[in-house]
Amino acid sequence: MDGLNREISDFDIIIKNGTLVDGTGAKSKLGDIAIKNGIIEAIGNFSGKANQVIDATNLVVTPGFVDIHTHYDGQAIWDSQLKPSSIHGVTTVVMGNCGVGFAPCKPEDRVKLVELMEGVEDIPAPVMHEGLNWQWETFEEYIKALEKNKLDIDICALLPHAALRVYVMGERAIKHEVATKEDMQIMRKLAKEAVEAGAFGFSTSRTISHKSLKGEYTPTLRAHEDELTAIAMGLSDAGAGFMEIVSDWNEPDPETEFEVLKRIVKSSGRPVVFSCTQRHDRPHFWEDLMAMARQAQKEGLPIRPVVTPRPIGLLLGLNGSQNPFSGTDTYKSISDLPLDRRVTEMRKDEVKKKILSEDPIKGSTFPLINRIGYTQMYRFGSPPNYNPKPEESIEAMAKQKGMTAAELAYEILIENGGNNFIYAPLVNYADHTFGVCKKNA
Ligand SMILES: [Zn+2]
């Protein structure tokens, strides 16, 4: 139909004059790329015509990024675009990380999994309740529900251990009871079935920073080695899949925990990836983890660290779900007001006095509240400052101004109609540079 007036072309698409970065670590170079039938046919200088020419002058052209640690498990059900990843050059995401997700799930457990995702990933529960259509109970049915939704990028789903544990053990999972032999047999069978249905593996969390919004630790926190091995054996039965783990590495100590991973890999033959970040309370510990991973590689055991190329942090503000005063009684009493009325209230001297005198930690629902302090909080600014220096911390700025850090934080929050944010980097920023990410890589 449309072929009548079409020029006979050598290629389907030519991307011209781009700065080409090929992803191998090689230096970037200027050049063109020609694509035919979905395959790159030529790179550099070549002649030929194309049906479509894209001018990439002053733009970077790269292979699509694969983001192996995301939490799009909900969004992939209700959205057609996986923003912000898909607008930043990511073409494939792995989701279902950290043991949290929505399948398998019995109808009576839906609220539990939503509360857990809300606490771990700060995705508001009302959004999830509205968006999740729950057309599934098993993992396979979840995959089918995902397939029905056309997305702008590719997804790989992991079987989340918390969902699996609650599905098999119910309340016992939430209470951190030890899985019985029978529980483990069922988990193994379900893991095998999940991989056969398309799961890329399974994920688990062993960190106390993963809590539900009610403050309950994630159900997988203290799962025994036998249980993890049983699930890994499920992957082995299916002949595919890897295990993703997030851990505090202190139960009882890093070496013992790493040995557990090694034994799981040895018995199941399935690879493991773990999150490796620089914690600010233990700024050099990541080096020990890297050394242990290198040693495992030498022993032929595929246990690989996953490194984020930037700090991971929080944005705190009146326009977000948490701010440094969210846990105080007085803030809680006005937290449901619209933003402008909240700001008006907070400008009142008596309200300010009360909020600043109350304990923000005891009544907090924020799992990470104990890990942030004013020495590591910064005015986010506009344009945003992702690379703040120590002297720009709220603690340091407050000292300069002759006020307390809490007073300054309060001031920042109510300025600009309450739309300001405070940035609190949580990992990979102990020395106030991005250097550790490069070393880590
Ligand atoms: Zn995660």
Image (cartoon, helix red, strand yellow):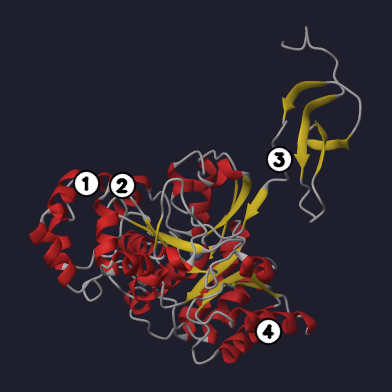
Which residue matches tag 4?
292
Q: Earlier in the sequence, mark 2 or mark 1?
A: 1
Q: Is mark 2 within 8 Å of ligand 1?
A: no
Amino acid at circle 3: Val
* Residue 174 seen by the camera: yes
Q: Quadrant of the C terminus?
A: bottom right
- Tell whether 30 sits left or right of 148: right
Amino acid at circle 2: Asn
Residue 435 at x, y percent in the picture: 63, 67
Q: Quadrant of residue 62?
A: top right
Q: Earlier in the sequence, mark 3 or mark 1?
A: 3
Q: Secondary structure at mark 4?
A: helix
**Residue density around tag 3, few if under 14, some if 14–19, many if 20 or more, within 10 Å:** some
- Tell whether 127 sits left or right of 147: left
Which residue matches tag 1?
339
Q: Quadrant of residue 42?
A: top right
State how far apart marks 1 and 4 are (Cα).
49 Å
> Are the residues at dot 2 and dot 1 in contact (C-beta closer than 8 Å)?
yes
Instruction: Out of 234 and 206, give the one closest to the viewer.
Output: 206
Q: Quadrant of residue 44?
A: top right
Which residue matches tag 3?
60
- Above or below — where is 292 with respect to 17? below
- Tell whether 151 sits left or right of 22: left
**Residue density around tag 2, few if under 14, some if 14–19, many if 20 or more, within 10 Å:** some
Q: Which mark is residue 85?
A: none
Which residue matches tag 2?
419
Amino acid at circle 1: Leu
Q: Earlier in the sequence, mark 2 or mark 3?
A: 3
Q: Earlier in the sequence, mark 4 or mark 2?
A: 4
